[in-house]
Amino acid sequence: MILFADALTHVYDEQWLGPITKYQILAVVAAVIICALMIPLARRVATGEPVRGPLWNALEALLIYIRDEVARPNIKSGHDHDHHAQGAEHAHDHHGHVVAATHDPHELADRFVPFLWTLFLFILVCNLLGMVPFLGSPTASISVTAVLALIVFLVIHVSSLQRLGLFKYVKSYIPQLKGDNFIMTLFLTVLIVPLISVIEVLGALIRAAVLAIRLFANLFAGHVALGVILAFAVGANGAFNAGGGAAAVVMGTALSMLELFVAFLQAFVFVLLTSIFLGMQLNPEH
């Protein structure tokens, strides 16, 4: 049991500087790394200068993929609630003639692209920090993933309130059901509609919980598995075990490669689910 606990010390949070914990410091380190990467890239893109170098090209490719394949397909403007679209339906020239509409169909999605980029990069860097010896992944802590899920929850519902208004926002949780006759309509209105409304509200809360738990569980489980494998290298008496050490090196290397893939995958899945939930809430008619 003691050997098992020693092998898992990298999984748990601990105090490093007084009351400041390891994961709190690593979260700040992740933010600094992101700023060091993104600020020079943003300045270069703003000037129109082409991006050079494998690191920045790979980073730009990742961000463009998030924008074009995640944000834009899942967060669509719709046609009932987008006030910008209504204002751009009939553009006129200086002679008063109707010209082509100027509305960008990706305008709504592009408003949330910087938020999704920030989420993706922060989660990815936090995940990758767990690959560095003696460090750890802040996203392997449920408190960190819970805060991320809370931020996503607030962004989704505050944005929906701003876009739909209070009345339409509340109405989006209330289904419109009608029966073939008065008795059936009364039954649906009195019993089924309130039940579905409660389920819809609970569903919004559950979606946020799912974001927090799945990210935490995947990262935590991977680190636990790696810790258990490394424990094979130590015998029952605390001495180094050659056979167990060789097995630990082979299995640990293979699992580390899997963990590297999982680090990218879980960051992508978190952002993908966030964009889907945003699209669902911002366009309830769909």
Image (cartoon, helix red, strand yellow):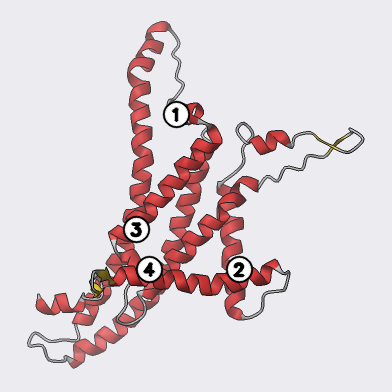
Question: Which is in the foreground here, disc 3 or disc 4?
Answer: 4
**Residue lying furthest right in this view?**
95
In the visual, does 34 lie left or right of 251? right
The alpha-carbon separation of the residues under discs 3 and 4 comes to 11 Å
Disc 4: which residue: 27
Residue 243 on image: x %, y %: 20, 90
**Residue lying furthest front in this view?**
18
The alpha-carbon separation of the residues under discs 2 and 3 comes to 26 Å
Quarter of the image that includes the N terminus: bottom left
Q: Nearer the viewer, residue 271 or 27?
A: 27
Disc 1: which residue: 170
Q: Are marks 2 and 3 in contact (CB under 8 Å)?
A: no
Q: Earlier in the sequence, mark 4 or mark 1?
A: 4
The alpha-carbon separation of the residues under discs 2 and 1 comes to 39 Å
Q: Which quadrant holds residue 43?
A: bottom right
Does residue 172 show up?
yes
| Amino acid tagged 3 | Thr
Q: Earlier in the sequence, mark 3 or mark 4?
A: 4
Q: Earlier in the sequence, mark 2 or mark 1?
A: 2
Which numbered disc covers residue 145? Answer: 3
Question: Which is in the foreground here, disc 2 or disc 1?
Answer: 1
Residue 96 on image: x %, y %: 89, 32
In the visual, does 182 lie left or right of 81? left
Secondary structure at numbered mark 2: helix
Note whether 120 is above or below 93 in the view shown: below
Quarter of the image that includes the C terminus: top right
| Amino acid tagged 1 | Val
Residue 284 on image: x %, y %: 51, 34
Q: Earlier in the sequence, mark 2 or mark 4?
A: 4
Question: Which is in the foreground here, disc 2 or disc 4?
Answer: 4
